[in-house]
Image (spheres, rainbow, N blue to C red):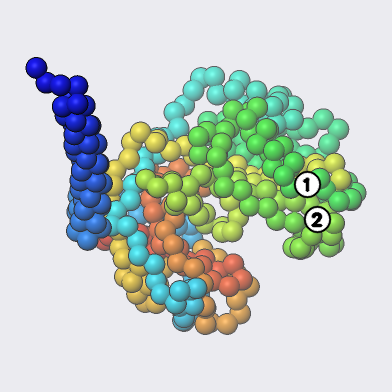
Amino acid sequence: MASLTETAIVSRKAIKYTVLLIIIIVVARLAFKGGVSVYKRLFPPKPPKPTVSFGKLPSIPFPPKNQPENLSYSLETTSGRLPEFPQQVEVYFMPPTATNIQALEQAKHKASALGFSSEGKLIIENVQNVYLFPKARTPSNLTMNIITGIFSINYDLRSNPRITEGVPPSPESLEKKAMSLLSKAGYLDTDLKESIVTRKLLKAEGENFVSVSSLSESNLVKINLFRKNLGSKKDIPSVTPDMPEANVWFLFAGSKGEIIAAEYHHYPRDEKQSSTYPLKTAELAWQELNSGKAYIANLGENKSEKIAIRNVHLAYFDAGLYTEYFQPVVVFQGDNDFYAFVPAVTEEYLAKK
């Protein structure tokens, strides 16, 4: 029989070796994980091939605009280089708007929620689905396509020019007001609930509105609501044909923050139906810009034919009209609100015009 002393010695050794074994296991595990991490950085796995489930994509519906000629470009980004794009991004399906026998009743509810009379009428007898809804005791009208829900708000400033008097409420409160109106009228889908918002301060000068730098100088505030960022990393914004203006915007005037104009040209996107497509490199898109193959969305206030490009990035083109697929573009942004777009998907997956 072992003595108590011998038992104590054996116990201490067992504890010592157990602790040592645990330390070795922990160190080995950390070393293994670190090695795997380093290996993946040095030899990253190849991304899966693009799924291209929609086949060849139709041409992006850039609206007709006068395209300036003989423009030349200089790359003047912060880094002095073009960015690196991912090899592929998602393209989303956009379901067509279905006709609905309750469309007129639903439109009346929307009009009422937006602050207008529910008693609308056809604007032109032979043009179906487009209705005009008045506003009681106010020179303001809501024009709506009762099938798509697309609408415009107009206010006759000549009838009441004093509505623009006074400093408007804070842009933050007006943004909440715009979102609340859209929510009440059933217009906030997932893309707009998390809108990327821009604000513009304006001042009325005669029949024109000019930009100002501070709220105290302004009479009006414009709230632009862009779709939320998309893509697998949620870092790809949307652009419109009228950049830097969104397809959904409100113009608020005067100390009461009255709506004197608004546009809603938004079509839903099916988040569950998407497919990945290969992308052009930024270098190839830059070549297309310089060879005159880009769409000039906005020349801006540039009087020179020489355009400095300050920012190059990916975006989704939000046409403001129905299109079957929501596709990416390469955006070239310059001084004075210059915007040019190049389709981002590689040519082999674009249908010929």
Please say if 185 is above or below 345: above
The residue indicated by pointer 1 is: 170
State left or right for residue 1 relative to residue 212: left
Disc 1 secondary structure class: loop
Residue sitting at x 45%, y 51%? 235
Identify which residue is drawn at 69% across, 27% down. Answer: 113
Q: Is residue 196 left or right of residue 327?
A: right
Decide which of tag 2 and tag 1 comes sooner along the chain.
1
Q: Distance between the residues labelled 2 and 1?
A: 8 Å
Asked if the residue under mark 1 is in contact with the one under mark 2, i.e. CB atoms within 8 Å, the reply is: yes
Q: Residue furthest top?
A: 1
- Name the residue nearer the viewer: 14 or 232: 14
Q: Taking the image as drawn, is residue 308 in sight?
A: yes
Amino acid type for the residue under numbered disc 1: Ser
Q: How crowded is mark 2: few (under 14 residues within 10 Å), some or many (20 or more)?
A: some
- Looking at the picture, how far across and down is residue 344, in whole percent? 35, 59
Task: State the count of labels.
Answer: 2
Residue type (three-letter) at the residue carrying disc 2: Leu
Percent coordinates x, y for residue 310 in the rendering: 51, 72
Disc 2, SS: helix
Q: In the rendered image, is residue 33 in sight? A: no
- Please identify the quarter of the rendering in which residue 81 is found: bottom left
Q: Residue 215 carries which label?
A: 2
Query: Residue 64: horizontal and vertical position, in percent?
Result: 49, 60
